[in-house]
Amino acid sequence: MMLNAPIPLLMITPLAAAVICMLLSERSRLLVSFAAVLIQLLASLSLLLLLLQQGPITHPLGSWEAPLGIALRADGLAVLFVLMTSVVAGIAALYAALYLTPGPLRAHFWPLFWFMWAALNGIWLAADIFNLYVGLELLSLAAVGLVAFSGSKEALVAAIRYLLAALLGSLAYLLGVALLYGAHGTLSLSDLSQQMQPGVASSIALAAMAMGLLLKSALFPLHTWLPPAHGGAMTPVSALLSALVIKASLYILLRLWIELRIHELAPDASQLLGWMGALAIAWGGWMALRQTLLKRVVAYSTVAQIGYIMLMFPLLRADNAEASTLALQGGVLMVLSHALAKAGMFLAAGNLILCTGRPELSALAGTSQYRPLSIFGFGLAGVSLMGLPPSGGFSAKWLLLQSALASAQWWWIPVMLLGGLLSAAYVFRVFHYSFKEAENSDTFHRPGVGLEICALALSAASILLGFIATWPLHLLTLPDILPLAVLPEGSLEQSLELLQTPTYETLHGTSEQQP
Amino acid sequence: MMNLLPLIVLMTSFLAAMVIFMLPEQEHRLRSLVNLGAAVLKIALILLLIQYVVAGFRPELRLEVLPGLSMILRADALAMLFAGLSSMLWLFTTLYAIGYLEGSPNRSRFFGFFSLCVASTMGISLAGNLFTFFIFYELLTLSTYPLIVHRGTPESLRAGRIYLAYTLSGGAVLLIGIVAIYALAGDIEFGDLQRVAEMAPDLHPLLHLVFALLILGLGVKAALVPLHGWLPIAMVAPAPVSALLHAVAVVKAGAFGIVRVVYDVYGIDYSWQQGLLTPLAIVASITILYGSLRALQQTDIKRRLAYSTVSQVSYIILGITLFGPLGTIGGLVHLLHQGLMKVTLFFCAGNYAETLGIHKINELDGVGTRMPLTSAAFTVGAFGMIGLPPVAGFISKWYLGTGALLAGMDWVVAVLVASSLLNAAYFLPLLYRIWFKPVPDSWPHEMITRYRDTAPLLLFPALATALLSIAAGLFAGLQISPVGWAELITLREYLP
Amino acid sequence: MSSSAVIFSLAGIGLCAIGLFGFMLHTHLIRKLLAFNIMGSGVFLLLVGMAQRSGHTDPVPQALVLTGIVVAVSATALALYLIRRWLQLSGSTELPEDDRR
């Protein structure tokens, strides 16, 4: 059964679905896509099981060995991102099927959607820096297509801006790849992590890569392309872009930072990322407060949240295993909960716009009265984004706060808390409009129940994550896996002990029985 | 099963909230049924829990939500004090709210958040560590916001914004404090006093700082001066919400949090030895006097009551700071007494406004003739606040006064006397107007004329809580009275 | 490092710089796209040049450059399509001033 080999399945299904979708009639595209979503979900789950049984897995695609072949690998971090993608993209696909009216528009959506998913899986599972480049490019092209495909003038401008930024970012990244290969003669992340030495070529290479990735992640002040693209796209696309596409470049940055030991070699660069993150929190939050269009508020909130995620970098300290582990856990949890919450929030915002028929915030007056479900979906996601308990966002903030205390970098604490208050301000501003007295009676449209459920499911998942955060975090602590690379010698046992719980031990026990 | 009970208690109001949200707006009867059913069920469950706690059990449920960090729901004696108060007053407030909101729009939303608010209060009382406490503390902020802005007028939206600015900032400060104490001492469960007591002496200054942060964060909701600014502004909310905010939910959550920090995290012995209590006592005394003085200046009934809350809640905090069993009993028992008396006063104020359109104090003239029962209940509440026997407030002040003398803090007695005089000064003129001034020719805006006094659903809760306030004073010697329970807590948990 | 490798690398870096300069400076979209392609060629040249250092030819960079060219061609095609649509819709070859709503 193919499910025994989930890694190739995760790559081939979306690519095949994309190609098949281009060939078929519109109705069949929908059916193929649903089947493929199902396969993706099952494959991600079976990959999770495989990881729990065997530990991290590497898979040479088509049995071609590296360096010429493409090697894929799945460790705890990668599997978490694969699962996140399956959940968010799966629900977004359902939403899109209900949201897009039948016609050429909906027909165009599916091939682009599947190329995007293929690129995402390619990035999560890539084991070398060049495959990451290919994944990034494919992702950018698919995402730009998704922004543009509604065909309006605004969407086109946003798409062109996005494309130019993405191309520049990719090239900067590729330049870094070329320099690294020239200096070290290898592309594999694990080889590089062993050979990495400080040097001019490596520094320039990593600086170029980081710049490119930050541009693609829209970290302040490189964010200007994001709000029009994310705020102007069609609702399911906005959700996919903010929840998943942005995370790809962040994921690569995190991989480089830890595996190439940048946090150890260049702690100043980590601090710089943190301060850029702090500025992003302030600027994104401030701009979100000043928007008049609902989806722009949500888009600027993404700018701020990216800054929040960046705060993990200065907390990854080579000399402090406890702080590093907490920072990594907090950062990854922040990414996961932001993906769920932001996707839920964009979908809920789309529903509210369907209700009122207008994109402005001021149109919301009375919605809390007549469409409480839509507001409720928005509110649940807002709780997680504000970092209020109980939610994934709160648990992540808690871990990051603890990490800041453990590494004695107290100055990040006010940044995090003020950032939370700022996001509360712009989220509650939306509620403020929705609670305003409506002049007339129920004149709102009624978005379909399916659309409401999609938004609510994602938002509720971001809340639920606050209760079950231990198990995604345990995936990060599986033996022989990335975060332990940041620990100094000898502290491994100690930190494992720190993180051990009955759940972990049962997992560990089964893996010993099945060598 | 016993250990699941705290969760079930929490879930009764949480599920009630969810069901109410799902019900269509026009299903008024079904909604009231769900509401009252859940309220009665909760009281029954709490009574069952109290049985277990009296028998010496401590039902507890925990869930690990982050590595090394658990959410704990636990029914100890102190938790039952607050949970008992909330569940009982929830029933009366729900009844009152059903009567109050008769015929107004958005009831589905209102009662949904109302139940969610009570669920948060239950969570606060049953929390077994600071982490769990914080979760429900913030949930309370979220669920009260829609109640405050319920009317959707510019004024109430402004009040909502100010409320959020205060409470969310307070929450952020509290979070720093909690994270810091977790970093210093790990996951401290309530009652686990060894952790702090055995901390190395060089960490003590840090612990003091954290104590200050915790009190600062909690002080916003407890309306300690100068963090009280949101409370009088939040008065624009509908009367049942004000009753809930002042008697059960928000201010009490802050006060209860301070009780937990002093007794169950730092320990009364440690706090006393380190001199942490005296500054807190001074802040509480200032709040008591300032609140009373400001109450005196108000011309709006609800605003006067609001400032009276500022003052009265600090009695609880003052009691906590008095080292010794009597002070403790005084503080804890006032948590209950103030709730009963203040909820009565707010019900009555709501009745005046709804029945006759009376909002200002000078409009109260002769209202005792038109609404004798409401006015009687109001009088009981006011007497209680002043501290006249046999109403419950007298008992609180008695214990506080003797507690202060035993703790060697004689100046507190002066504060108590001064504040009682001020209480009398701002309540007695109201009573005089109500009972002894002539009836005016017309009322400001008479709305309910069908009844001699006011609608039964508005009248009954006010009378019931007024009677309970008297009963709590008269039967203070019984073991089931608030005083009896506070004695049990004091004996069992703080002075072993 | 052989002298030809140095020449390749320097030329590559030079092209990159020229491309970046053009990309930043021009507002005409086609010129921007051309500048991007020049930058891309510079990076490819750098990759090929770096590969020659050990005397024999390293197959990996060749494979990378081939892949890179495919990617660059598709990106250019998409960009051209979008730019043409924009020209049809607005009659302009430049983007409007930054919209910061």
Image: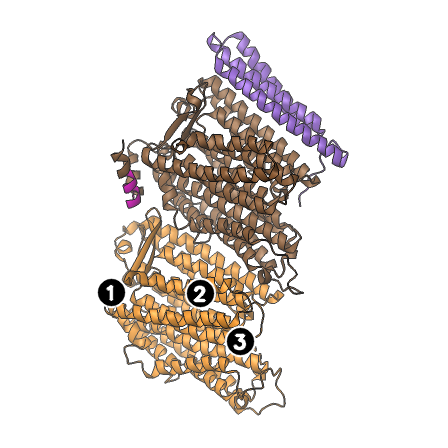
Chain colours: A brown, B orange, C purple
Look at the numbered discs 1 and 2 and tell me whether their residues touch, using CB distance below 8 Å: no
Look at label 2 and name its amino acid.
Ala
Front one among B274 and A477? A477
- State the image coordinates of residue B318 (x, y, percent, origin top left): 37, 70
Mark 3 and mark 2: span between their CA atoms? 20 Å
Q: Secondary structure at mark 1?
A: loop
Query: What residue does disc 1 label?
Result: B57
- Residue A55 or A255: which is nearer the viewer? A55
Along the horizontal axis of the image, is B294 left or right of A437? left
- Above or below residue B2? Residue A514 is above
Picture quarter with the N terminus of chain B? bottom left
Decide: few, some or many residues near mark 3? Use Cα within 10 Å; few <14, some 14-19, many ≥20. many
The C terminus of chain B, quarter of image: bottom left
Q: Earlier in the sequence, mark 1 or mark 2?
A: 2
Return the residue at label 2: B16
For mark 3, name the chain.
B
Queried whether the magenta region covers residue A48, the answer comes back as no
Residue B294 percent location from the top left of the image: 51, 73
- Element under label 3? helix
> Who's the residue at 30% across and 70% down the image?
B48
Instruction: Specify the amino acid type for callout 1.
Output: Phe
Label 3: which residue? B100
Q: In the image, is residue C79 above or below residue B327?
A: above
In magenta, the rendered stretch is A500-508
In the image, taking residue A419 as reference, residue B384 lies left or right, namely: left
The picture quadrant where one finds residue B281 is bottom left
Q: Is residue B95 left or right of residue B46?
A: right
